[in-house]
């Protein structure tokens, strides 16, 4: 009897599909994927693939972003309930109300937002290009709204000297990482370097040697001479880091840093998704059209 991985590989060919997985996915899902990366890398892969079907092993906003940019492709999310609680902290109506209070403000939104929110904004960024985009596109603007992540906004503000009108959203997974977790791990592993994601609280990013997107963290780990690394993000990323750096040791800052939504995707669901062509992600066409420009600009800002 064929095992599940063989079935997935066979169906993938039949369907002319590609499997994209975020760095926080379960190890076995990462291992079956054609590409594993951060939000920006996954969006770029989705945009450039000639596959007809994209099986997106991530959360809803990621699959939705891919669909908006490539409306001719079928984009499948193996679990339709894999959402992002931070993205759900603001909707289109709430952003319209905020804009009405600041009618001349430019609006920068994190990619972790719904299509309805992206449709209301001027620019969209990921954690990989937020600092560059803010500096190169928005510096000098008298008023800038940044939604929904208050901590990413705080990080970009620190890096650029800019000021933002923020929304008080946050990632519940990264908010679980506390400064005392970093202090404890540093005391336990004094030779280790500390890398964290900018969705962490400022009190946490201030203690890090490197703050980066998940792809930036993977790159840093490969390029750094350090052999011990304290990892301040969702624990799933350590699977890839270990695979790419067999001689290095990784310590999760907090075992609590697990994104339950990312973990909803399993190998079985990937198989069913290919078998039954479910669950298609299809944002309303009018909203998708209005969100397109901000996504296109985001894809043009790649980290150096
Ligand atoms: P990146 O992978 O783009 O760094 O973002 C992390 C994230 O928010 C996924 O939840
Ligand atoms: Fe959303 Fe946080 Fe999960 Fe990323 S880790 S999908 S920001 S809840």
Image (spheres, helix red, strand yellow):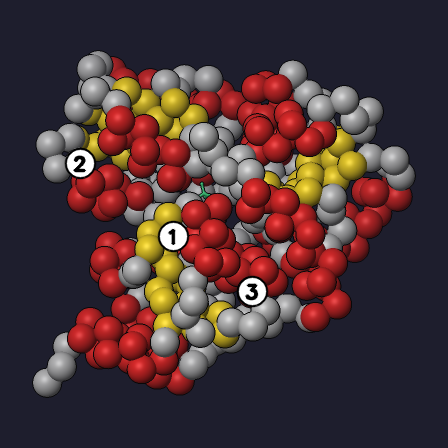
Q: Ligand 1 within 8 A of label 2's CB?
A: no
* Residue at the disc numbered 1: 22
User: Is the residue marked by circle 2 packed among few (<14), some (14-19), or many (20+) residues within 10 Å?
Assistant: some
Residue ID at (18%, 44%): 243
Residue ID at (49%, 53%): 43
Q: Nearer the viewer, mark 3 or mark 1?
A: 3
Mark 3–mark 1 Cα distance, whole angstroms, equals: 18 Å
User: Is the residue marked by circle 3 packed among few (<14), some (14-19), or many (20+) residues within 10 Å?
Assistant: some
Image check: 162 left or right of 255?
A: right
Q: Nearer the viewer, residue 56 or 207?
A: 56
Q: Which mark is residue 220?
A: none
Sequence-wise first label, 2 or 3 = 3
Q: Ligand 1 within 8 A of label 1's CB?
A: yes
Residue ID at (18%, 75%): 6
Q: Secondary structure at mark 2?
A: loop
Location of residue 222 with respect to 148 vertically, above or below: above
Q: Which mark is residue 70?
A: 3
Location of residue 206 with respect to 10 vertically, above or below: above
Q: Secondary structure at mark 3?
A: loop
* Residue at the disc numbered 2: 245
Splitting the image into 4 quarters, where does residue 64 fall?
bottom right
How far from the left and from the top, in percent, is residue 259?
A: 40, 50
Mark 1–mark 2 Cα distance, whole angstroms, equals: 18 Å
Q: Nearer the viewer, mark 2 or mark 3?
A: 3
User: Is the residue marked by circle 1 packed among few (<14), some (14-19), or many (20+) residues within 10 Å?
Assistant: many
């Amino acid at each position: 009897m064929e095992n599940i991985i063989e079935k997935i590989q066979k169906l993938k060919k039949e369907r002319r599909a590609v499997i994209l997985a975020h760095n926080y996915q379960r190890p076995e899902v990462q291992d079956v994927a054609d590409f594993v990366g951060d939000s920006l890398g996954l969006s770029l892969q989705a945009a450039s693939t000639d596959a007809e079907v994209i099986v997106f092993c991530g959360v809803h906003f990621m699959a939705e972003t891919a669909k908006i940019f490539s409306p001719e492709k079928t984009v499948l999310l193996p679990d339709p309930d894999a959402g992002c609680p931070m993205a759900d902290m603001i909707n289109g109506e709430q952003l319209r109300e905020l804009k009405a209070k600041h009618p001349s403000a430019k609006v920068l939104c994190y990619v972790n937002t719904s299509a309805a929110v992206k449709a209301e904004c001027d620019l969209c960024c990921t954690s990989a290009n937020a600092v560059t985009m803010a500096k190169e596109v928005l510096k000098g603007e008298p008023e800038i709204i940044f939604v929904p992540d208050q901590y990413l906004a705080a990080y970009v503000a620190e890096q650029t000297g800019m000021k933002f009108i923020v929304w008080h959203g946050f990632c519940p997974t990264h908010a679980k990482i506390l400064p005392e977790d970093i202090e404890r791990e540093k005391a336990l592993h004094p030779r280790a370097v500390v890398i964290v994601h900018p969705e962490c609280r400022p009190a946490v990013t201030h203690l890090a040697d490197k703050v980066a997107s998940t792809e930036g963290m993977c790159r840093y780990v490969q390029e750094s001479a350090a052999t011990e690394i304290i990892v301040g993000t969702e624990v799933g990323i350590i699977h890839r880091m270990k695979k790419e750096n067999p001689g290095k040791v990784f310590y999760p800052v907090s075992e609590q840093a697990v994104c339950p939504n990312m973990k909803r995707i399993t190998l079985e669901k990937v198989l069913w998704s290919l078998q039954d062509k479910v669950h298609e992600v299809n944002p309303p066409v009018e909203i998708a059209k209005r969100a397109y420009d901000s996504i296109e600009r985001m894809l043009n800002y790649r980290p150096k």
